[in-house]
Amino acid sequence: MGAPIGLDFGAIMTMGTALKADLALLADVMPAVEPIIIDNLSGQEPDNFSE
């Protein structure tokens, strides 16, 4: 079985809707944090983390 390569943004937005999250903020932030989440799930250090 391979490592994760991406997140299901449709599912994330559906969860955001159910949790009454700010969907515009979620849509803006998720592309930036997706690589960090994927690296964490696959046991790697984040490649492009910037503060």
Image (spheres, rainbow, N blue to C red):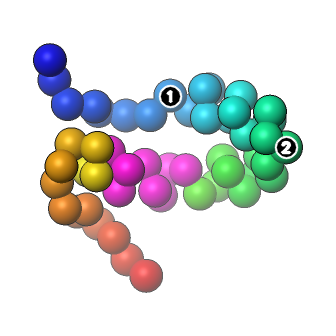
Expressed as whole percent of the image width and height from the top left, the position of residue 31 reads 50, 50
Q: Which residues are magenta?
A: 30-38
User: Which label is found at residue 20?
Assistant: 2
Q: Is residue 29 above or below residue 23?
A: below
Q: Residue at x 37, y 34 (%)?
A: 6
Nearer the observer, 29 or 21: 21
Q: Residues within 10 Å of mark 1 (few under 14, many from 20)?
A: few
Q: Residue at x 19, y 62 (%)?
A: 45
Q: Residues within 10 Å of mark 2 (few under 14, many from 20)?
A: few
Inspect this view and state whether residue 35 appears.
no
Residue under pointer 1: 8
Quadrant of res 50: bottom left
Expressed as whole percent of the image width and height from the top left, the position of residue 2 reads 16, 23
Q: Residue at x 26, y 50 (%)?
A: 39
Expressed as whole percent of the image width and height from the top left, the position of residue 23 reads 77, 46
Quadrant of res 15: top right
